[in-house]
Amino acid sequence: MRTIWWEDGHIALIDQTLLPEKLEIKRISTLPELCEAIRMLRVRGAPALGAAGAYGIALACTSSRAKSTEEMLDDVQGAAQQLKRTRPTAKNLFWAIDRMLEKISRASNVEDMRTAAVCEAEAIAEEDVEINRRIGRNGAELLEDGDVVLTHCNAGALACVDWGTALGIIRWAVREQGKAVQVVACETRPLHQGSRLTTWELMRDGIEVMLICDSAACSLMRSGRITKVLVGADRITKDAVFNKIGTYMHSVCAKAHNIPFYVAAPLSTFDWESGEQDIEVELRGAEEIIYCGKKMLAPQGAKVYNPAFDATPMENVSAIITERGVLHPPLRMEDVV
């Protein structure tokens, strides 16, 4: 299921804010439209944001009226800064944009810069699909026939260009290895990426899934009904995994009940130079908690704290599954570079 692609000089993507009620493709022709789509989570998930950032730079190049390479670089640098401000915690977004800038800067003229930008963005997108399939193959070895796997938020095809990271592992275990694996999907408040996206995606693929309230997870672990926890990541530092808010809570509960806690992520998500304290955690608007659609769930003006992510310390992580293999904390630089 392709979630984002380049089409006739535009960016096409699945508008994830409309799921599961409607599967609709949104076509984006300007950088402000793309920035809005990223901020509003029309496109989301670490690898998908990398592709979105790459396509955004390609869009900036192809729409620029620059006459010289210097003017083009100025335009692209401005676009890069706008894109980077949309989701400050997402490492893949920064990684892809920086890769695009490096590629474009080597071109000798404006037309070559435009061509290089589109080709490199397409390469980043295609690589993501292959990387996720490798993650799936590597991670599936950790799943056993009969496992019941808890997941949080959405780390499936919708979070990537295709296939998925955490859900890609489950997909590989079920489809390629024939294992009977069931999924327990947390609803993932406040925007319900688990109920809206993960459940929709798995049901569409015919993979058995049960939806629960976030607060039910620990009880299921204690009762023995969860055998493994498997999540994605938006940034991995040398001492912590940043993922959707609520992930840390699941890691604590898993550790207390001796349940393996696995993280699936491409190496482009790693930020070896930083520690937990160096990372800006994105804070989102109060309306996401006060409202559910048009329904008011809290008084207008209520004081709200709404971080998009939390940090899970490495001591709570059993393994990190990457395209190169399975890494076990504590991590070493040579493992991730």
Image (cartoon, rainbow, N blue to C red):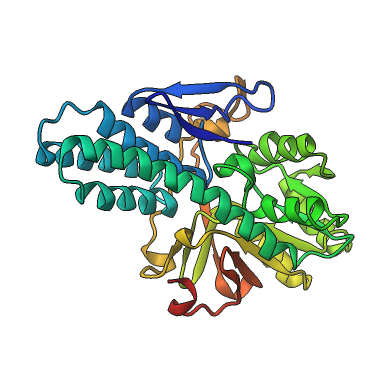
Horizontal and vertical percent for residue 217?
Answer: 77, 54
Judge from the rendering whether residue 331 lies leftward or rightward of residue 116; answer left or right.
right
Relative to 228, 271 lies left or right: left
Residue at position x 84%, y 55% in the image: 181
Specify whether residue 304 is in view: yes
Count of picture labels? 0
Q: Nearer the viewer, residue 251 or 197?
A: 197
Q: Is residue 30 left or right of residue 193?
A: left
**Residue appearing at x 20%, y 46% in the figure:** 107
Question: Seen in the image, is 64 located left or right of residue 147?
Answer: left
Quadrant containing the N terminus in the rendered view: top right
In this picture, is 325 found above or below 219? below
Give the image location of residue 226, x and y in percent.
83, 60
Residue at horizontal 56 percent and vertical 31 percent from the top = 290
Q: Is residue 50 visible?
A: no
**x%, y% of residue 179?**
86, 57
What percent of the width, then of the height, locates residue 130?
Answer: 57, 52
In the foreground, 13 or 318:
13
Seen in the picture, residue 274 relative to 7 is either above or below; the reply is: below
Towards the viewer: 162 or 152: 162
Quadrant hosting residue 173: bottom right
Q: Give the vertical position of 25 relative to 214 (above or below).
A: above
For the C terminus, give its image quadrant: bottom left
